[in-house]
Amino acid sequence: MPQLRIRITGSEDDARAIGNLLTSVQGIEHVEEISDLMPHMDDPDSSSAGLPDDEGPGMRVLEIEAPNDATAAKVRDAVEALAFDLDVMVEFESDEAE
């Protein structure tokens, strides 16, 4: 069973729209937002903390389980199309050794 992780760089609304799209794809069994394991070097005591240049779009990671490779390919195509429309950056990670 293919498992994909999608890293979304955009607003919470954009991530929600992509999550809603994924749940509507026939055959998708599992969609879950997982914690971002990458540490962000945010220092709240920094003199530049909170400046507009220091803030950017959020990052979220969605984990998807698909029943087969064909459905995983549909997921990639659908997410890429929606990300283009929303002007959002998405990255795909695959669990499979290639």
Image: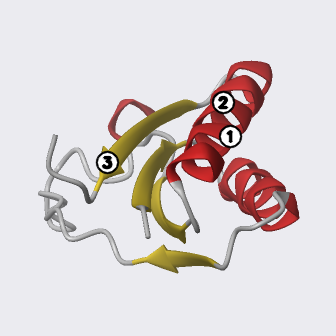
Residue at 23% from the left image edge and 44% from the top image edge: 48
Q: Position of residue 28 (x, y in %)?
A: 70, 68
Q: Residue visible at 42% across and 57% down?
A: 4
Alpha carbon distance from label 1 to label 2: 5 Å
Q: Which residue is mark 3?
A: 93
Disc 1 residue type (three-letter):
Lys
| Residue 63 picture location, percent across and down | 47, 69
Of the numbered discs 2 and 3, the one sitting upstream in the chain is 2
Instruction: Please rate how many residues cluster around mark 1, counting C-alpha atoms within 10 Å: few if below 14, some from 14 to 19, many from 20.
Output: some
The one of 96 and 46 positioned closer to us in this rendering: 96
Crowding around mark 2 (Cα neighbors within 10 Å: few <14, some 14 to 19, many 20+) is: few
Counting residues from the start of the chain, the first of labels 1 and 3 encountered is 1
Q: Residue at x 60, y 44 (%)?
A: 70
| Mark 3 element type | strand
State whether residue 45 is above or below residue 59: below
Spatial CA distance of label 1 from label 3 is 15 Å
Q: Which numbered mark, 1 or 3, is in the foreground of this view?
A: 1
Q: How is the image coloured?
A: secondary structure
- Most foreground residue, 88 or 42: 88
Task: Give the SS element for disc 2.
Answer: helix
In the image, 54: left or right of 14? left
From the viewer's perspective, is residue 42 above or below residue 69? below
For mark 1, what is the residue? 74
Q: Is residue 44 above or below residue 96?
A: below
Give yes or no for contact between labels 1 and 2 (Cβ–Cβ under 8 Å): yes
| Residue drawn at 66 percent across, 79 percent down | 29
Question: Which of 47 and 32 lies nearest the eye of the viewer?
Answer: 32
Q: Residue 98, percent across and down?
A: 16, 40
**What residue is pinned by disc 2?**
77
What's under tag 2, amino acid-wise?
A: Asp
Count of labels in the image: 3
Choose top left, top right, bottom left or bottom right for residue 12. Answer: bottom right
